[in-house]
Image (spheres, grey):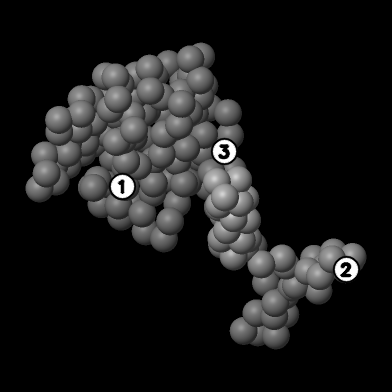
Amino acid sequence: MHRLSGRLAVVATAALLAACAPPSLRAPGEAPIDDDLLERPSSAGGKLRAMPWRPLDVRADCRFRDEAGYTTRITLDVAQSKVKTFNADVDIPRRGSCRIHGPFTQTREKPSVQLRAADGCTVDIWEQGKAVTVGFSRCAARCTPGAFDYLWPIIVDRSNGQCH
């Protein structure tokens, strides 16, 4: 009896997992879909096209503090997608702080700007409408232990240089 209930549990678990699995995108044996068939027309009746690239220009020397006490200080100067100055300090309440300072090497100018340090810390800077977003990856060594998990991207208003 105990063996039978164990087998039923395995079968029930397998059935439950199968019910939760995402549906297949094509029938077994069906050929993959040609990506050219997936192109959607734009409102003008043609194919969608990527936005043309334009050089990034932004300057900011600002400090921002939100209601929870999360504090950001950033100095950023990018002209024609070339970074002249970049430093960021972030204090995260009850978690610690991060100091993202150079030296950095600029590794990309388009489609977004990227900086990389010898320790692997990478800073990505990209435009989103009137805002410029500054994101961080592999920069935990520049933060107090555990703080990097709570480090948010910094948003800079390109029109006035304010950050939030």
Residue drawn where x is 52% and y is 34% of the image: 114
Q: CA distance from mark 1 to mark 2?
A: 48 Å
Residue 126 is left or right of residue 155, and the answer is: right
In the rendered structure, the answer to whether residue 117 lies left or right of residue 94 reads: right
Q: Quadrant of residue 97?
A: top left
Indicate left or right for 31 with 6 as reference: right
Residue depicted at 45% across the width and 51% down the height:
127
* Residue under label 2: 30
**Which disc number belongs to residue 109?**
3
Above-or-below relation of 100 to 62: above
Tag shown at residue 156: 1
Query: Mark number for residue 68?
Result: none
Secondary structure at numbered mark 2: loop
Q: How far from the left and from the top, in percent, is residue 104?
A: 46, 20
Q: Element type at marker 1?
A: strand
- The mark closer to the camera, 1 or 2, is 2
